[in-house]
Image (spheres, rainbow, N blue to C red):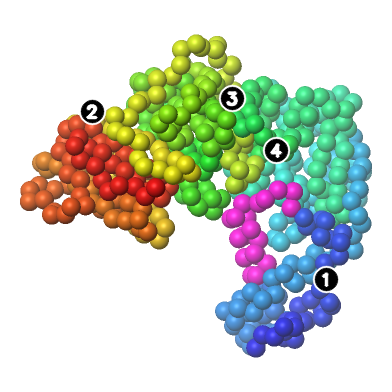
Amino acid sequence: MMTGRRPSVTSSVWNSQPIKAPTKLCYALSYAFEPLAATEKRRRQWIQSSFASNLRLRLGSRRLPQELALMISQYCIREYAIAIVSLPMAGPDTSLLDPLRGIWACYIMIDGVQYFSSFANQLSVGAQLILSVEEAANVDRMYIAEDHLGIRQVCVGNSTSPVLDRGGVSGLWWRTLPLHDGAQLRVHTDGLKIRRLESVPSNEISRLAENIAWLTPEPRPDRIRFHSFTSECPTQLQMTSFICNDARTTAYSACWGWPILDLRAHTTDGEDEAPYNEAVMRRKNTVWLYMPVDEGEFISQIWKRSRQLTRELALLIVTNRDRVLLLGPQPQPHSRPCNWSLLHRSDGAPSRIFFDITSPRGGIHKLGFEAPEPVSSRELPLVPAPSSPYPESSSLDDYFYSSAPLENIVELTPCEATVAGRRSVIGLLFRYSDGHQACVGQFRLDCAATPMLVGSSTEMWLSFDTNDGYPFVDAVGISCPPRPMSRTCLYLSWAGKLEWWFSYKQCKLYYREQKSIGTKS
């Protein structure tokens, strides 16, 4: 039975010592930035599993089943996490290191993860050589991998040779430090492990390293062209990227959460559902925008739309086949003219586009481009004008707009997701007889339902329902007469254009003279 005190049965696991986190330990375990939810989940599971294993080892596995040990461990995670790192420790400190003399490193394990505890130019007890004198003479870059608690990996290279693929580890970020002649490394420790490295004296690359961490090792960050997407930008940035116009790309997605939260390219290599789930964890009221690309189609222009408010920021993607996707809400009627600036122009050659995900709830603040700065153009982008009216809306409810022709469709794929506790169809992906694809509404690959073949059908239908007064599509079908009888259905023949307005909580559809249930304003 659990009481307000620590169960006596577990006291032997931490030798019955009172558990109180010292000030120095609190500092050493403080977060440098907000970790991913998956990282926190892994840490909690490791602590719980480690406690259960130690508990069974002390009491005997036959006396205490694993299931019961795991149940007990749920009540002791905080105390056990403190106990396993409650070591004699000094306070924060800094020191200088000469990389040309070689580097020896010692390690410490925290919550099942290995961190560097110290660096030195001389061999000491338990130290391992991570950079020899001979190797140091032939490299000019050091790549530092860190998470929210400290430095976990170090590798070296130079600006002329490709970097080994060491990226993609969840929660791990890389900084690039130059090892130029006479440069030393300033080592910052928190008394338990190494928190930060700096190159002194500094140059352009080392100054970037002080402010920007990368998802993969970046050998020449000084060659990236940066653009501030928002007026306010954090001093410490975490940058990730996608390859624009990769030959394997099949579509692009953007997660909108006032403003853009995430960008990604989908490829023929397959999909990972984690980015979708992580975006949902960041902010519940998100909208996923999707743009398929056909064979031979590529992004030719990227524009930025700006007005006074952050929520009015948007990107506009234009392809070589005049497909246009607005990564942002449609302007409301009678709104002030917006400002457009050309950020990127391409002839189809692959290049990386960088964006920061520093603030999980604050959206993208900075963009980066490998391609050179485009020549400014007086010609403004052509944004498709809706032929249907803007839905009734409150001043705080932004709507996104999409449309697609219905001629020559051979297959449609519904996107089904749970919104406010109700299962709904949030969008449709159409495939045409010539292989072209188009999307209306939202579309997420992890929510794609079974595709429907048009075959000999003469029409499709969409039925609607409301959730607390907010209309949504609850079903879609392809039918031959007789039709399902309902006053809450739209019937669409395979001709004309379907227009789909949507926010994160409701939608409004138009087809010829028909329109769906009115939106809640």
At a point 86% along the width and 44% down the height, the residue shown is 188
Q: Going by the picture, which residue comes out furthest to the left?
A: 482
Q: How crowded is mark 3: few (under 14 residues within 10 Å), some or many (20 or more)?
A: many
At a point 40% along the width and 24% down the height, the residue shown is 383
- Position of 472 with respect to 166 (left or right) is left
Q: Answer yes or no: do the residues labelled 2 and 3 have beta carbons within 8 Å?
A: no
At a point 86% along the width and 42% down the height, the residue shown is 187
Residue 253 visible within the image: no
Residue underneath mark 1: 20
Q: Nearer the viewer, residue 122 or 196?
A: 196
**Disc nearest the viewer among 2 and 3:** 3
On the image, the x and y values in percent for residue 18 come to 84, 77
Say if 497 sits above or below 489 in the image: above
Residue underneath mark 2: 434
Residue underneath mark 3: 369
- Position of 217 with respect to 270 (left or right) is right
- Which circle's residue, 4 or 2, is located before the other in the chain? 4
Q: Which mark is residue 259?
A: none
Q: What element carries label 3?
A: strand
